[in-house]
Amino acid sequence: MPALPSWLTEPLWDQFVALLPERSEYHPEYPLGCHRRRISNGVIFDTMLQLLRFGCSYEAIADTTCSATTIRSRRDEWIRLDVFARLKQIALESYDRIVGLVLDQIAVDGSITKAPGGGEAAGRSPVDRGKQGPKRSGMTSGYGIPLGRVLAGANRHDSPLLAPTPDRLDDLEPLPDDITVYLEAGYDSDKIRTLLSERGLHVRIAHKGEKVPIQASQRWHVERTHAWQNASHRLAPCCERRTTVIDTFFDLGDTIITGRSLIRQTWTTHRWEERRRRRP
């Protein structure tokens, strides 16, 4: 069963394989070439997509074509090469070049999920009877394209995580002169307003005690993006223990969200050879 439709995975794979260094099918220390062949990168990439989408364990997804140890080792190899972060950056640059990122309106909000196995980014959840869980402070553009995140334990308040979150905008320069950040009532404090003002950012915060529908501001975009991310069962609940691996799966998930949005929006404005007859 494919984890994602082919119209989305094929362009992702074409860009992903271009980022990988060339490597021989056989290990160079075996001149006779009589040892086992290296598992194809395409097989591992498809397995990573299945892990992200279905959230199963490495042992459950492993079969005769690829073992769980090989999946983990190749995953760590790609993490050291920073391939997933580069792939996400390319997706953002492509979206900005073709459609245009709405960077003058930024939404930031936190989201708590479960972490049954604990881990480096897990803490006692205040909304789940003290069970272990991670919190992410996510930032999106005006249309809901994920721009970055900060991971921490579920016991951390949203306010301290807000300071490092806008730093993810540095990779998207040049930025608009006027940027407005939309926040929920949990950030309603003079400290937050001063922090964002020092960065040259305008702020719109829902006031505590006042019921404001989420549609009344641009904050609903980040709420929708959290729902898109939580649809990947590798991320909700969080099945990884190391922060670097969690960030890797988030980068892969954000790339899928960005690529899917790019294809859907350009379907009505652009033409290409492999363009589907129906809007994806």
Image (spheres, rainbow, N blue to C red):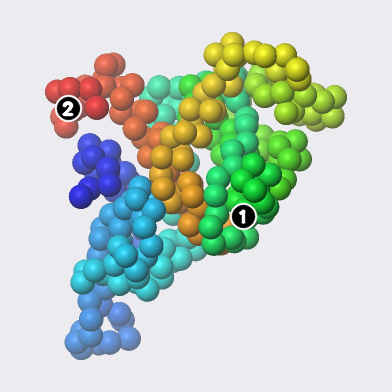
In this image, 247 relative to 182: left or right? left
Horizontal and vertical percent position of residue 35: 23, 85
Would you identify the image quadrant in which residue 253 lies? top left
Give above or below for 248 relative to 276. Answer: below
Query: What is the secondary structure assignment of the residue under circle 2?
Result: loop
Give above or below for 255 relative to 211. Answer: below
Q: Earlier in the sequence, mark 2 or mark 1?
A: 1
Give above or below for 182 relative to 236. Answer: above
Q: Amino acid at mark 2?
A: Arg
Quadrant where the image shows the C terminus: top left
Would you identify the image quadrant in which residue 97 lies? top left
Decide: few, some or many residues near mark 1? Use Cα within 10 Å; few <14, some 14-19, many ≥20.
many
Q: Amino acid at mark 1?
A: Gln
Number of callouts in the render? 2
Q: Nearer the viewer, mark 2 or mark 1?
A: 1
Horizontal and vertical percent position of residue 222: 54, 28
Q: Is residue 25 visible?
A: no
Decide: few, some or many residues near mark 2? Use Cα within 10 Å; few <14, some 14-19, many ≥20.
few
Measuring 52% from the left and 23% from the top, which residue is drawn there? 221
Horizontal and vertical percent position of residue 50: 31, 53
Query: What is the secondary structure assignment of the residue under circle 1?
Result: strand
**Residue that carries the numbered disc 2 in the rendered image:** 276
**Residue that carries the numbered disc 1 in the rendered image:** 132
Q: Is residue 129 visible?
A: yes
